[in-house]
Image (cartoon, helix red, strand yellow):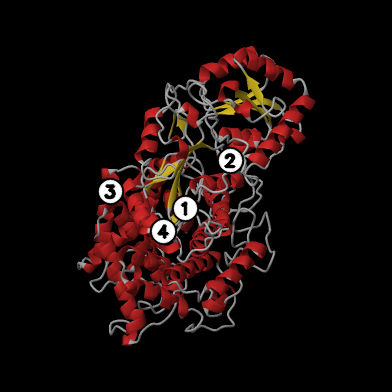
Amino acid sequence: MNNVKSILSKNTYSNTLKPIAFNEVNLKDSFWLPRLITQKEKTLPFAFEKTIPAIENLRKCGRFLEGMKEDLPFPHRFLSSDLYKVMEGAAYLLMIDKDTNLENKMDEIISIIGDAQKDDGYLYVPHICGVAVKEEMGENPYEYVLHSHELYNVGHLYEGAVAYYLATGKKKWLDIAEKSAQHVNKVFFEGDENYNGGVPVNQAPGHQEIEIGLCKLYRVTGNELYLNMARRFLDIRGVTYTLDPNEKGVMAPEYAQQHKPVNIQEEAVGHAVRASYMYAGMADVGALMEDDVYDVGLGNIWHNIINTKMHITGGLGAIHGIEGFGEKYDLPNKDAYNETCAAVGNILFNYRMFLRHKDAKYFDVAEIALFNNALAGVNIAGDRFFYVNPLEADGVTLFNHGNAGRAPWFDCACCPSNIARIMPQVGGYMYAISDSEIYCLLYGTHYTEINLNDKLIKTCYHFKPDLIVLGHADMISKDILYNLKKDYSNLKIAQWFLDPLNKNGPDFYKNKKRILDKSDVIDGNFLTTSPDAVSFLSKKNMNYFIPNPSDQSMETLDNFKKDCSNDVFFALSHGVHRGQLKNRSSDDREKFIKTLINKCKNIRFDIFGMDNIQPIWADQYFKNISNSKMGLNLSRGTPIKYYSSDRITQIIGNGLVTLIDEKTHYNDFFEDTEMVFYKNISDLSEKIEKISEDEKLRKLIGQKGKAKYMKYFNSTIVADFIINKTFDLNKTKKYLWHKP
């Protein structure tokens, strides 16, 4: 059976990843959730207040269309877009917490927008009301599309309309968006006698955005017209351009990426926001059409940006004046522009490149831009903003559009309104899926529901697996597994169960039910608790202990090689709600830890997740464990044979001395020079004191423990054991933890 295939080990896939929509993800963590609450309670009301002029302009436009022409709006190219972005952010926030008042406010504004739209779908206040400034907007609709922002505005309208439809199911704004898109298609690509003399405009917009909005319209409606429009707007860019190619600055073809057809562009040039929005649209269209026409160009542009034109913060567009890209390596610190909108564009671009290519390097860049630039664009209070983001500032010199620091708003308010929409949609960046995969992209406490039964069926159809390994597969039904075994006669199913099975411990009955529910259909139970200690298990010949596997790529520290300032590390997360400790939360380990601390007066403890000390995860966990000599492997409930949790790999795998209760029977596998076994709390305190005073002994135990665990309990050996036992292979092969 050398050709055993596991669905967990496939490296190539046939389809592009799909995002999990923001409305399908619930955030519960201590980092993002408080920021979203701030967005809801502070940033959003503040942004709505600042966009009242846009609402009033739309209201006056509606009255104008009704024949009331005495109170005209003031001209502005993109005022409406700021409002649409704020409304898009509000739609995302409605998914976090239903708010009837906010929803009513949105419905009221949507009615105002609808009233401001002409019957044919045209929606642009200055031209409808006859107040357009010729030099900025042209005399007639779409006459100066290269700089008028007519299509930029409606692109943001489309994005907001889609978000609100997903959040509420209400179609009124979506209907406005579709009416606009169909109008744009007719005027630009078919010809409308009321516009441009009936001749198709056939020009790409000066500020890209509509391409992204059209792709979103296509995703939610399934109408291929919108996807085809996005493709046409991209393909005519640099082809139908009519202005003088010798112009400089903001009038240069490069400024709006009109210098070449997009599929042969190789370098990021011009206005950084326009460029990054365009690249995002290209990635969208390529993915949705499953067409690689843009892939080479986008790949070249991506490398050009990452290697030569991006600040370490993920900031784009270092050059003032054009708000854009300069020459290679022109990346000043003090004088960098790095518009906040460009950071948002960087996120949009790289997220879509990840979906297209399934390569983590793209999302790494999106993550850098999100955490180190976009988040910097707004203060913690949610009411002060950066337009530009240099890498150094003295707090005195004016740089942020006349401010020495963050400002409450800007005359050109694209950045704060972009912040108002990018932060609430972060939930949509948490997951991505294909028919066979689920990708978790950002750290945080969050969850989503995915129809795993359908995805498992599709996966089996494509890959014809010999082995399926189930973890906590609560959403996979037993009936589906039965049917799969009927369809694939050679299929074996194993269950890998990591939680404790101690009758006197936590969640015992839930965990018992999880195992028994699927016991009839599986071919092997692999438990991190010894089957000898679990009375409810039948078919003893198919129940096996496996250790929590180590992975050299994850456990990278060698604490035995260095001096550490903390003696004992311990962290727990029980009793956590939304990333915060629950009020009056308790854990049966707290009494033990407190008693231990009292006994070890001279020992430096690093304790998290109890006694009002917040829990830690991910990078923070790694940082703290890296400075500790010893780690306490203490699980909830009374110790049970062989159960140790993943904590043991984090401790011993990083070269800390592992302190573990001897009742776990890990001394079946390890010597006293590899782990430290204790009988009771007094015995433990004595051994901690001894090791803390003897660096040579500490480093020896840490080194020998890690070496043995990595050699015998690594993920490759554990996987080999699962395969051999499930398929009844290599019966004579020896494993350190297994005694036949």
Going from N to C along the chain, the mark reached first, 4 or 3, is 3
**Does residue 665 appear in this view?**
yes
- Give, as a three-letter code, the residue at label 4: Cys
Residue under numbered circle 3:
103
Residues at discs 2 and 4 in contact (Cβ within 8 Å): no
Q: Nearer the viewer, residue 85 or 304?
A: 304
- Alpha-carbon distance for marks 4 and 3? 43 Å
- Measure the C-alpha gap from mark 1 to mark 3: 49 Å
The residue at which mark 1 appears reads as 467
Q: Is residue 230 left or right of residue 350?
A: left
How far is the residue under mark 2 from the one under mark 4? 26 Å
Amino acid type shown at disc 3 = Glu
The three-letter code of the residue at mark 1 reads Leu
The first of marks 1 and 3 along the sequence is: 3
In the depicted structure, whether residue 642 falls above or below residue 588: below
Which marked residue is nearer to the observer: mark 2 or mark 3? 2
Task: Identify the residue at image location x=68%, y=41%.
Answer: 711
x, y percent for residue 218: 35, 67
Circle 4 packing at 10 Å, graded few (<14), some (14-19), many (20+), is: many
* Earlier residue among tags 1 and 4: 4
Among the two numbered marks 2 and 3 on one chain, the one whose residue lies closer to the N terminus: 3
Badge 1 element: strand
Measured in 3D between alpha carbons, the distance from the residue under mark 1 to the one under mark 4, in whole angstroms, is 10 Å
Q: Nearer the viewer, residue 630 or 109?
A: 630
Residue situated furthest right in the rendering: 696
User: Which label number is shown at residue 549?
Assistant: 2
Q: Earlier in the sequence, mark 2 or mark 4?
A: 4
Residue 112: give x, y in percent of width and height: 26, 59
Tag of residue 460: 4
